[in-house]
Image: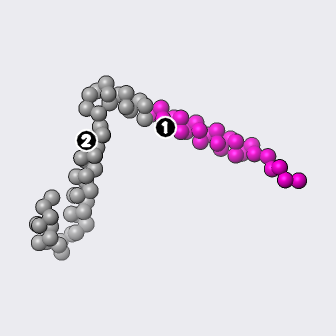
Amino acid sequence: FNVFEAMKRHDEEPQCHRVEVIEEVVEDVFAEETPSLPLERIMVNSIDKLEEQEDHEIEDYLQHLESSRVDESP
């Protein structure tokens, strides 16, 4: 992405230039955060999956507690 070229043609579809910049940033961050070794990738993904399952279980327990709540006022 060349800023100077984009400024020369600022009338042409400005939202496209923004998408290109955002896409580049997302790709860079994804490349940095994605484990490169297969074993590391499997371990990280399995931990993420376990955390998702735990979050779901916690939400279920909270809903159950909320639904079984007893009103203490007379």
The residue depicted at 23 percent of the width and 58 percent of the height is 21
Magenta stretch containing residue 34, yes or no?
no
Q: Which of pointers 2 and 1 lies earlier in the amino acid sequence?
A: 2
In this rendering, would 13 be left or right of 60? left
Q: Which residue is labeled 2 in the image?
A: 31
Name the residue at the right extreme: 74
- 16 vs 27, nearest the viewer: 27
In this rendering, would 38 be left or right of 49? left
The residue depicted at 70 percent of the width and 42 percent of the height is 65
In this rendering, would 1 be left or right of 39? left
- Residue 22 at x, y percent in the picture: 26, 56
Q: Which residue is labeled 1 in the image?
A: 52
> Mainly helix, strand or loop, the magenta region?
helix
User: Which amino acid, mark 2?
Assistant: Ala
Q: Quadrant of residue 68?
A: top right
Stretch in magenta: 49-74
Name the residue at the bottom extreme: 11
